[in-house]
Image (tube, grey):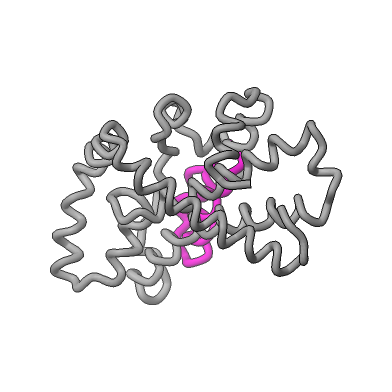
Amino acid sequence: MPLSNLISRFVSSDLFYRVPALLLALTLHELAHCFVAYRLGDPTAKQQGRLTLNPLKHIDPLGILALWLIGFGWAKPVPINPLYFRGDRRRGLLLVSLAGPLTNFILAFLTALLLMILPPLRSAYLLPFMQLLFIYNIFFGVFNLLPIPPLDGSKVLLYFLPPSTAYQFTQLEQYGTLILMLLVFTRTLSRILYPLAGIAANIITSIVVLLTGGGI
């Protein structure tokens, strides 16, 4: 089923399905950042209680409300201190930044795979949750990879920029929220995000179909 049809079908789904799917996608995204930073030698997130599956440690109530109402939201920023990183700090920041979006794509893949190989998950009770979990992970992964400060994609881009250009680019971060809000309210963000999310969803479902020999 096309991603746009799934979104239209479930945009008014019961909170019973939407809340856990949203919290799971968001929590594992943030936990991935914390875990990779910790493995690279930075104890900051762990010391602040963020290395946990407890969603209450990661959610920002205002950010969740904004995500729910206008499609643009945020979690609590993960506290990271690259000075603790072992080895190349720029590479460490790249890995930490990629960890969240890649985790979302992996979760989307696993969700689609489980729907394929475990028919009971397609029941009337579980299917809405599984499809919403797929959608949220796709959108979290794609959205956070956009090269707009302070999203993860901006830090990925920094890794590939020359130092002088990278410094100039970091100055945009103070205007990042304003830029994102302008993109949301002018609907520019949706015009960028929906096609990219559709491509990501098609790639993931195609891989699942190839692996299982079935159809979703």
**Observer able to see residue 125:** yes
Name the residue at 36% across, 57% down: 153
Question: Between residues 119 and 59, which one lies in front from this camera angle?
Answer: 119
Question: Residue lying farthest bottom?
Answer: 87
**Observer able to see residue 78:** no
Name the residue at 35% across, 50% down: 151
Q: In the rendered view, would you say 132 is above or below 166?
A: above
> In the rendered structure, does residue 95 fall within the stretch colored magenta?
no
x then y, percent, for residue 140 = 48, 47
> In the rendered structure, does residue 31 fall within the stretch colored magenta?
yes
Question: Between residues 167 and 154, which one lies in front from this camera angle?
Answer: 154
The quarter holding residue 170 reads bottom left
x then y, percent, for residue 211 = 73, 68
Is 91 left or right of 148, judged from the image as shown?
right
Question: Between residues 3 and 20, which one lies in front from this camera angle?
Answer: 3
Name the chief secondary structure element in magenta. Answer: helix
Give the magenta-colored segment's residue range: 23-51
Question: Residue lying farthest right?
Answer: 120
Q: In the rendered view, would you say 53 is above or below 56?
A: below
Name the residue at 57% across, 36% down: 22
The quarter holding residue 201 reads bottom right
Number of numbered markers: 0
x then y, percent, for residue 173 = 23, 48
Question: Between residues 68 and 156, which one lies in front from this camera angle?
Answer: 68
Name the residue at 38% across, 64% down: 93
Is 159 left or right of 108, judged from the image as shown?
left
The quarter holding residue 109 reads bottom right
x then y, percent, for residue 114 = 76, 53
